[in-house]
Image (cartoon, helix red, strand yellow):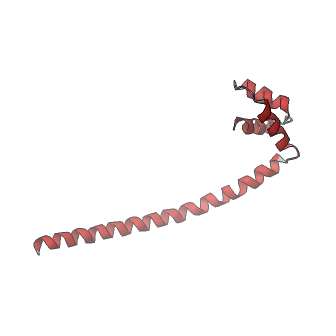
Amino acid sequence: MEYIYTALLLHSAGKEINEQNVKNVIQGAGIKADDAKIKALVSALEGVNIEEVIKQAAMPVAVAAPASAPAQAVETKKVEEEDKSKGAEEAASGLASLFG
């Protein structure tokens, strides 16, 4: 995960994402750099528009989260109200059976 974070950090700083820069950041954080992971990261990001990927990934999350929260809260309230009314009915029937 730290390799992905390194690439994002370099991108936000406006630095080129190359093997040497990634290795410097990783080592600067006190982590032993794995050359194979660095090479894989740099080659995987070659030709990728990171800004575009971030925009595409962020859009659905930001739109979907607020829409689902209120619906879930309403459903929870309905279930709680039903549970309370059932509990009261069961308690009343239980007391009625005691007095026959």
Q: Is residue 71 left or right of residue 95?
A: right
Percent of width and height locating residue 85: 32, 70
Q: Is residue 90 left or right of residue 14?
A: left
Q: Residue 10's image quarter?
A: top right
Where does the N terminus fall, quadrant-wise? top right
Residue at the limit of the structure toward the right, as seen here = 47
Residue at image location 48% in from the left, 66% down from the top: 74
Mark count: 0
Residue at image location 75% in from the left, 30% down from the top: 34
Residue at image location 74% in from the left, 39% down from the top: 4
Viewer-proximal residue among 48 and 78: 48
Q: Residue 32's image quarter?
A: top right
Viewer-proximal residue among 69 and 53: 53
Residue at the limit of the structure toward the left, as seen here = 99
Percent of width and height locating residue 54: 76, 49
Residue at the limit of the structure toward the front, as seen here = 36
Image vertical order of residue 79 relative to residue 51, above or below: below
Percent of width and height locating residue 100: 11, 75
Viewer-proximal residue among 55 and 1: 1
Image vertical order of residue 93 relative to residue 65, above or below: below
Image vertical order of residue 88 relative to residue 18, above or below: below
Percent of width and height locating residue 86: 31, 70
